[in-house]
Amino acid sequence: MSEAAYIADELREIHEGNAWHGPSLREALDGITAEQAAARAIESAHSIWEIVGHITGWENVFSLRLEGTQTKAPDEDFPPVHKVSEEDWKQALAELDGTHARLLKVIASLSDAKLDEMIAGTGYSVRYLLHGIVRHHVYHAGQIVLLRKALLSEEPAGD
């Protein structure tokens, strides 16, 4: 298995289940309502919904960069939630999953020879970005687990 395919598998597990660090991102989000996702469990912290929007935005940027497109950060780093409804929350989760699936496909298609190439418009390599993507996903999954615990006083599945 290529290193890129291995990283794609690791990122899939971190997102969907069987994560090495505890609950996967989707396990941490399981059962969260729109109202809970939009709530400020910690006044000075982002909401779960804002973190989901942040992950989605950055995973789109990561895909574009890996495809060779020079792109800046998302327009809004932690997009605010304008309308709290179950339908909008489900849409946010669907966008998260869709963007993540696209990113996994892009990563899995990379050859090992590509890993040492530089990302256009940056000072870092494809390999560096791939490992950063894994850390980014784990970091925010952990944030969501803590916010969930603060909101629900319970353990998410897989913990």
Image (spheres, grey):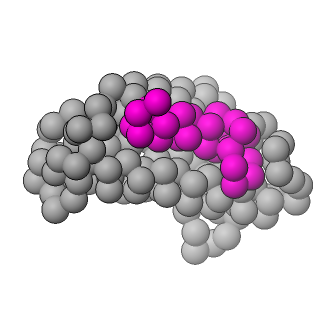
Q: Is residue 99 visible?
A: no
Horizontal relation, residue 131 to residue 151: left or right: left
Q: Quadrant of residue 16?
A: top right
Residue in the picture at 15% in, 57% down: 122
Residue 151 place in picture, x, y as percent = 78, 58
Magenta span of residues: 1-29
Residue 25 part of the magenta segment: yes
Residue in the picture at 60% in, 28% down: 90
Residue 79 place in picture, x, y as percent = 42, 51
Q: Is residue 78 above or below residue 81?
A: below
**Which of 24/41 is in front?**
24
Residue at the extreme bottom: 44
**Which of 73/37 is in front?**
73
Q: Is residue 40 above or below residue 80?
A: below
Residue in the picture at 32% in, 50% down: 127
Residue at the extreme right: 154
Residue 137 place in picture, x, y as percent = 52, 51
Q: Is residue 49 visible?
A: yes
Residue 15 place in picture, x, y as percent = 60, 39
Residue in the picture at 70% in, 60% down: 147
Horizontal relation, residue 3 to residue 121: left or right: right
The chief SS type of the magenta part is helix
Residue 9 part of the magenta segment: yes
Count every numbered label the image shows and give the total: 0
**Which of 112/79 is in front?**
112
Q: Quadrant of residue 142?
A: bottom right
Q: Quadrant of residue 4?
A: top left
